[in-house]
Image (cartoon, grey):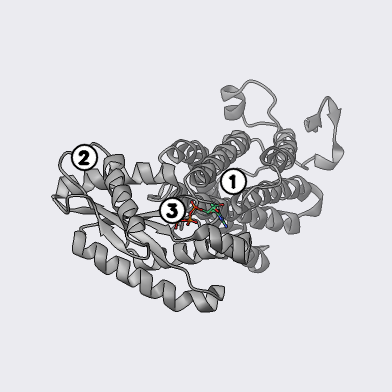
Amino acid sequence: MTRWCLGGRHLPMLAIPGYAGPSPLAQALLPMTLDPPTLSAVLLVQLVVLATALPLMTGLRRGAPVVWATAALWVQAGSWLAVLATGWAGEAAAALSYALGSLSFVLTLRAVEGWLGPRPLMRWAWGLPLALVVVFAIGHDVPWLRRGVSNLLMATSLAVLVLGLLAPAPTAPAASRRWRWVLATPMALLGLLTLARGVLGLDASADYPSLRGGHPIALGVLTVGSFATVLSALAFLAAWRGEAEALLEAAAQTDPLTGLDNRRALEQRGDALIANARRHGDTLLALMIDLDHFKQVNDRHGHAQGDAVLVLLADILRELMRPGDCAARLGGEEFVVLLGRTRSDGAEAFDRRLREALQARAPEALGFFVDFSAGWSVLRPGDRDVHDLLQRADAALYLAKGDGRGCLRGEPGGAP
Ligand SMILES: Nc1nc2c(ncn2[C@@H]2O[C@H](COP(=O)(O)OP(=O)(O)OP(=O)(O)O)[C@@H](O)[C@H]2O)c(=O)[nH]1
């Protein structure tokens, strides 16, 4: 008797000729009717619902990784639709289900790469769905190819995904470890079950766990596939939240006009640079820079040109500083650079290069010359934090303004 039923109604379309219900072992393990087509259909519905809900929940301003993840869910849904269709569409549907299944794991890996940075074997992974198409094209009537090699390729897709999830990701936030494990665990389990199907599929005499039969391994694939789907969607949401938090954090620390650090970021990075300089017995120099007569620039040339001056100065600062140094816009036309391992003579050299670059580039970029005043201070043993250092640089800047502008002055009392 056909046991395939969904909601109490028999679906003849899904009937598998010759299927006599779950094996005795499956019945002993799970004394209930867990028929594969019902499980496959539930899985398909789950995937469609989650693939629809994910973009709705993440909103229009989602990044590329969420788009890849959503595509992975849709493609996985297509794969299970093809599994359901194999009852009447035969080997073509089976080939499609394998190729789409493998493609969905590669798309998931691509999403993971967007969140975690470059992943191992990413480029090679695209070849796996293609290889599955080739295997079915040449081996549709060769059982060990169709059943064995295809599952081994599918298990390889899952192994590459698990590797991509667990490989070190130095630029990713530490909290990403939680969603990476939540996603990697069911994928690894699914990979092992698929590996078992592949090994049994290579042996013509073995009882092959077809996804349309009641073999415990097939029921395992369907059950694990079901919670892997739910956990994937949860992991995608957690990863997207981490992505949104990182963007907000960066925005909260960046000056929107120039892209330099803002005052908040300067305070954090400044204290870190001080701690680092003290640990290594290095010097740290603060240079405070203020454009001269900037109000007149705005009044004469307009606010947009005033903004262009600020952007030009920021660009030059970025080009002149060394990796590890910090440049920030404190507000208005006032900037600070913190230069590691630099003394007062370094302040003069940096000021000279900055002045030369500004004079050389301003006429072409702006159509007029601009100049600035600057004051420096050097880290002292008694400085509690970056404020103490900046206070003295500010006092030096005040001296430069008092001395007629367009010049550099050192902190009152000179270098320690
Ligand atoms: N275009 C532009 N102007 C700004 C911005 N922020 C502040 N300003 C202007 O910068 C000017 C600063 O004027 P003041 O503080 O008098 O400084 P100053 O004219 O440079 O005079 P000195 O510093 O004494 O040489 C004001 O006119 C502000 O409106 C900005 O983001 N863009």
Residue for badge 3? 334
Please state which of residues 401 and 306 is positioned toward the viewer in this rendering.
Answer: 401
Image position, residue 90 (x, y; %)? 76, 54
In the image, what residue occupies the spot 39% across and 68% down?
319
Sooner in the amino-acid sequence: mark 1 or mark 3: 1
Q: Distance between the residues labelled 1 and 3?
A: 73 Å
Residue identified by numbered label 2: 383
Quick check: marks 1 and 3 in contact, CB under 8 Å?
no
Q: Which is more foreground, mark 2 or mark 3?
A: 3
Q: Distance between the residues labelled 2 and 3?
A: 22 Å
Mark 1 lies on residue: 208
User: Which of 303 and 56 lies nearest the eye of the viewer?
Assistant: 303
In percent of the image, x 69 and y 53: which residue is there?
97
Q: Earlier in the sequence, mark 1 or mark 2?
A: 1
Is disc 2 placed on a helix, strand or loop? loop
Question: The N terminus lies in which quarter of the figure?
Answer: top right
Q: What x and y, as percent, mark residue 237?
A: 59, 38
Q: Which amino acid does label 2 sit on?
A: Asp
Q: Quadrant of residue 212?
A: top right
User: Which is closer to the viewer, label 1 or label 3?
Assistant: 3
Q: Is mark 1 within 8 Å of ligand 1?
A: no
Q: Residues within 10 Å of mark 3 (few under 14, many from 20)?
A: some
Query: Between 145 and 119, which is closer to the camera in this rendering?
Result: 119
**At which x and y percent is residue 95?**
69, 58
Label 1 crowding class (10 Å Cα cut-off): few <14, some 14-19, many 20+? many
Tell me if residue 203 can be seen: no
Report helix, strand or loop for mark 1.
loop
Judge whether 100 appears above or below 21 on screen: below
**Amino acid type of the residue tagged 1 in the rendering:** Tyr
